[in-house]
Image: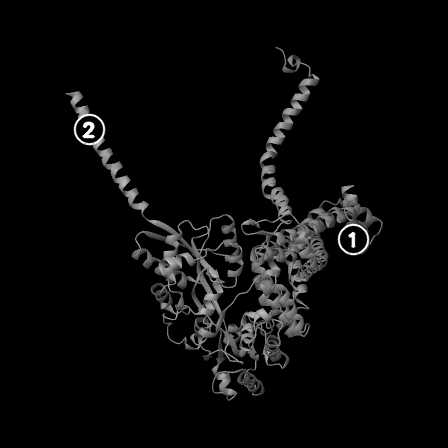
Amino acid sequence: MRRARAALAASVVLVLLTVVVASAADARSEKATVTTVTLSGWSAGKTEDDLLQSVVDDFNNTHPNIHVDYSVINGDYATAMTARFAAHNPPDVFYVDSSIAPTWIKQGVVQPLNAFIKKSKYDTSKFYPGLLNAFKVGKTYYGFPKDWSPLAVEINKAMFAKAGIKKAPRTWAELTADAQKLASSGAVPNGKPLCLPADWARMLAFVFQNNGSLAKVQSPAVAAAVNYYTGFFKRGLAATPTQLGVGWPGEALGKEKAAIIFEGNWVLPYMTSTFPQVGFGVGPMVKGKVNGNLGFTVSYSMAKDADNKQAAWTLLSYLTGKVGMTKWMSHGLALPSRTDVKAVGGRAPFLAAGPSSRGWGFPNFSATLTIMNNDLQAVIDGNKTTAQMLADVAASLKG
Amino acid sequence: MTSATETAPAPKRGSLFGTRMREAGWGYAFVLIPMAVFGLFFIYPLVYGVYISFFEWGILGKAAGATATTQNYTTLYHDPVFHRALRNTFEFALLVVPLEMALGLLVALVINAKIRGRAFFRSAFYFPSIASSAAITTIAIFILNPDGLLNRIIGSDQAWFGDSSTALYSVVGLNAWTTSGTVMLFYLAALQSIPTDVYEAAAVDGTGAWRTFWRITFPLLKPAHFFVLVVFGIGALKVFDQFYIVSQGTGGPEYSTLSAVFYIYQEAFKSANFGVGASAGVVLFVAIFLLTLLQRATVGRAEVG
């Protein structure tokens, strides 16, 4: 009797164990079909982080075989990513700013995407070419722009009214005339008509407007554009943010220390939240000989060391595709880099620059930018000539 | 009953040697872990950095087919930006260290005197040294703004950090203020170790306060002078954070706040030229090493005798 009871108990335990092991194995096999893809970028504020997380949640819901693990990299993004590349442990998909793209591509840490584009028949023609070129070397694609912003003209409406000017300047001639009117009418009592930083991230747009380029940086066209930009300082019509005691031109507009600035889409939420009492208007970027603008853009790119490249491509192509980008644009935080995705209202002056914008980036970026901006300050201060600056920049661009 | 002393065998030469070896073994065992950490995180990176400096070195390591050359050093030799960074760094150190020493010594002398509220002043002067350098620099940017507090007081509109003729000196002033509290502590400790009978003898001889300071106090502080000069001199030559913050990472205006460590950071982490960055690091290391030897040979001669 005792032996029978023991046998029965043993049988029950055996059956239970079989059930537990079988269900665990089943769960494992279900999990095994789900591929995890890591996604990282920097944080541009909680609103943007939450928005991207909701885009990622949508992706996870519609792609049951892929799970995207999104994490923000805080602090110095380029340095943190450099360490992760060196450790062969980068995120599968990540942000690449157009300014650092040439460096990372040259270092061989970014995956060429042509094979994936061909296999999935991904349509690249929907992107603005100037933005897409920032992530291309020859015919090889290394990323697709997730969004962008060009420069536009932002003006103080009250100051313009006081100077008797009806609209934002559209051309170089109008810009000069408006700055002079603002100065002579005393419309900007606590500052200057223009706030221009000693920064090629603004002046290069004027270079493009004069048919200049970095490829021929010592050409007369570039020199003329530089002289036009720095001429505002020499005539007392402009001041740098530092000279006005502000951190950047947006703050100068908000604190009514300047009537005209050239900033991107990011200035709109800043002005409405920080300086709601200041009436400001936005116009398209001024035109020189031609339309020319800078596209500040960031791509989604794939790491060469990505663990699951096919799944990473599925995510990348979703985020930069029409569906993902439409969701991403819903809050109006940035402009769509695809022509088939609509921006939220009030962004027309920025969108107008799409065809004429070129990505902000060039070879040997960091070292060259240091030389560009320090030399530009020296030109503004009269301690260096335009020709000397352009010679320094040309030498640095060669690396 | 026999005492332990009586029963203990007489020490022999061999066993004494063994005891010493055992003691030494324990000693080495105790320092083994700190030395391993020191070797792993200081000596190894130093040697590796020197090795890297002779190659074209990127994010993923040595460039394909790269051979050992002095090209990175040649690049530095011809790079005017690096020359400017070195010049700024040495100019900064040359100005800030004497200023820190003078301020630290002055405050230490005041606090060492028998005045009311000594503890309060000691804490107050030391406070900037314990506060975050980044936070203090950020506040200083506001204070030294064209419409900041300082200009309101003196009736000026000078952009102290934004003008190439004043930016470096403004950082010198800021750095001297933030670090002089620590210098004060070293001088205070040294002042309190000077025997009082020396001062009593001087007082009996009718020596005045000024003469007493220059003839007694200042010379007797020589070990402290040497220590502060070496430690804070090295710190000044490695300056980075304050320059980086005031220039918003540009080294400007007109290169006036571009330091040697800033150059290394930019070359290595922003441009991924680790070879050039490492060679700049080696140049800075050699410069600091030689300067420290010079200080030891001059100021520290009597001290290290």
Residue A5, by quadrant, is: top left
Q: Is there a contact, CB below 8 Å, between mark 1 and mark 2?
A: no
- What residue is rendered at 80% in x and 53% in y? B214
- Residues under labels 1 and 2: Cα distance? 96 Å
Quarter of the picture containing the N terminus of chain A is: top left
Q: Chain of mark 1?
A: B
Residue B301 position within the rendered picture, expressed as x and y whole percent measured from the top left? 79, 45
Mark closer to the observer (1, 2): 2
Q: Which residue is mark 1?
A: B213
Quarter of the picture containing the C terminus of chain A is: bottom right
Q: Is residue B128 visible?
A: yes
Amino acid at circle 2: Ser
Residue B229 position within the rendered picture, expressed as x and y whole percent measured from the top left? 72, 51
Specify whether A55 is left or right of A205.
left
Specify whether A20 is left or right of B81.
left
Frontmost residue, A339 versus A18? A339
- 10 Å crowding of disc 2: few (<14), some (14-19), many (20+): few
Residue A314, by quadrant, is: bottom left
Residue A77 position within the rendered picture, expressed as x and y whole percent measured from the top left? 50, 57
Residue B122 position within the rendered picture, expressed as x and y whole percent measured from the top left? 64, 53
Q: Chain of mark 2?
A: A
Classify mark 2: helix, strand or loop: helix
Residue lying furthest top: B1
- What residue is rendered at 49% in x and 70% in y? A358
Specify whether A397 is left or right of B214.
left
Q: Is residue B163 visible?
A: no
- What residue is rendered at 54% in x and 59% in y? A103
Amino acid at circle 1: Phe
Specify whether A343 is left or right of B189.
left
- 10 Å crowding of disc 1: few (<14), some (14-19), many (20+): some
Q: Which residue is mark 2?
A: A11
